[in-house]
Amino acid sequence: MTETLPDLPPVPSRFGFAFSADGRWATCLRSAQDSVVLERWDLTWPRPSLRTLDDAALPGRTEERIIDRGTGALPLNDGRVLVVRPAVGEHGEPAGHGTLAAAEPTPAGLRITRSWPVPRMLAGFLLAAPGQAQVAVLVVVENERHSRIWRVSPASPVLEPVLRIPGVLSGGVWADEGRVLALDRDGAGQRTEGILVDLRERGWRPFWSVSDTTADRIAAYSPRSGVLAVTTTLPGAQQRGAPQIGLRLPGGGPVRFPEALNRSAAHRTPLAFDASGERLLVREIAGATARLAVYATGSDRITPVPGPPGMLWPPAHWAGDGRIHVRFSTPHQPPTLATVRSPARSSWDMAAHPSDSAAAWRHAELVELSGPAGPVEAIVYGGPGWRDRPRLVLALHGGPLSAWRYEFEPLFQYLAAAGASVVAPNYRGSTGYGDDHLRPVIGDWGGPDLDDVVHLGHAIAHGRGTALPRPVVLGASYGGFLALLAACRAPDLWTGCVALAPFTSASGLHRTTTGMVRDRVSRLGLAAAGDDEDARRDVLRACETLTAPLLVAHGVRDEAVPVEQSRALRRRLLELGRTEGVDFDYLETADDHNRVVQAWSPVLRQAVVRFCLTAGRTLALDNERR
């Protein structure tokens, strides 16, 4: 049966925000499907304005484009932009080298004024020091064992190598106005520590570390006051994802962990200091939403910043005039730059490209559902009558220690535009609801969280009565694993099941994956269980009971969950006598994990939406015939 899908414009997204050292400029990447452009924001008063800088727009351009999804950009104080991009091979794999370029805006687009080859690079990011004399560095991850720091001068024909450091370097800040960097270093055993790098002396030393089992990171620094904000996952907190925030005051001494800053159940992240260095801006995540708060270092008090419900991400910039700039999104607002004109008042400006509002993006609401162990918060699309829509999708998030956030979700927008209700619950194991809600799933994948999913599915189906189709269960990554288990445990509960980049068991994923994913499975995966319990948590052993129509999609370049996980499920279904194209559909794409999880490509997104609509319509017709 052919379904007419909603005609929505390309879904916009903004990511990779960066601010110039003086705070006048910001840059980000804006994508709409496969089109990626650079945006430069002028943050001067009265309100931010933006220009789109497409490096393909210049007349007579012959060199290769440098702006794509893997590009990193940094605005300089004079308005120029530094752009870095790791090269990729023919099939999207890392090529092991890259390009750094200096560019300046022109009326026609982005003009490259100088470029430098970077001989060894898997990833890289740029930092520009505060102060009048612009000192910029390029931090390059050469491989899994070493990183290198280069000094960048837009006037020089060559990059200046500074030093090579063992380990993988990530985010960080300047600890002065051009000589010392504070960076995060991932060493052996997935351990993270803060280090100081002296560019003049070309040396480095460990600076911030609690123990060999904690993840200790640099968060923010105030050149005015000399206060440094750091985070650590204290013993036990690394599993729960609840970092503690510490402050290192000028003159050295131990890092202190202010009680007012750390006693809340909300997940807090340091973002930026104000111009005086006496107030620290933090992000608080409580449930599905995030908000800003200001911590006063002198009085040890934290004050919420009034604002609309939604989701916020670092980085943020706190300007000298008191305004705060930060990336913001809601279910009906694609990510954009939000400006808080005063932290003490509910006064926010949203700057957006005209095409961001080209579609009537659907609104969502926060709803509390009844779970088997207590309330479960859910983000619901479909309005007051969401339970009575002809088609309803129960969406399961990845993780396991993750959550749905009150933000723009492209796939949900397409489902809602097609007339489906979407229910995205934060069942047990979801972050943002405290340890009691999260802890039961650690070492018990497919246990309490699956109980919640099946319970919610029964409650929703019962509320819809017999005249409406049962829900479709949809999940991605860990959520795909959970959706498959739900379809196997309660086969008559679902109209259909969609699994995007799923794995089939914790033990199977541990055998086939590597690196951080394997380490995460070791720390958070299944504890020892009996044979019967193992069978209930292994999709390959449990799928004999599967009767609902199934759609499985996986990317051949998936670096997190190998495509062999879905291929094994396909083989098992065929062994059981199931017919591909009738009982189940199987799709492989050329994408990586994130693009499949987000159903980013139009072909995959259309396949998912059509499957959800068709499964519901088929059952509705069967009911009518009865």
Image: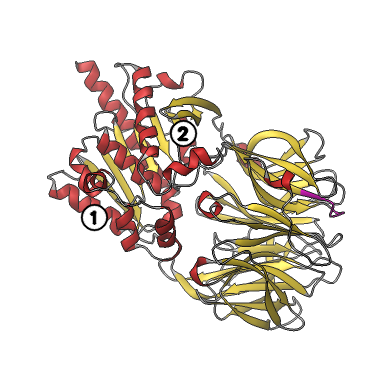
Identified at 42% across, 44% down, the residue is: 441
Kindly identify which residue carries mark 2: 425
* The stretch drawn in magenta includes residue 394: no
Mark sitting earlier along the chain (1/2): 2
Queried whether the magenta region covers residue 277, the answer comes back as yes
Q: Mark 1 or 2, which is nearer the eye?
A: 2
**Residue at horizontal 54%, vertical 72%?**
187
Q: Which amino acid type is marked by label 2?
A: Pro
Give the labeled residue for mark 1: 568
Q: Secondary structure at mark 1?
A: helix
- Residue 548 location (% of width, % of height): 24, 34
> Taking the image as drawn, is residue 371 in sight?
yes
> Which stretch did the figure color magenta?
275-280
Helix, strand or loop under label 2:
strand
Choose between 547 and 74: the one closer to the eye: 547
- Residue type at numbered disc 1: Ala
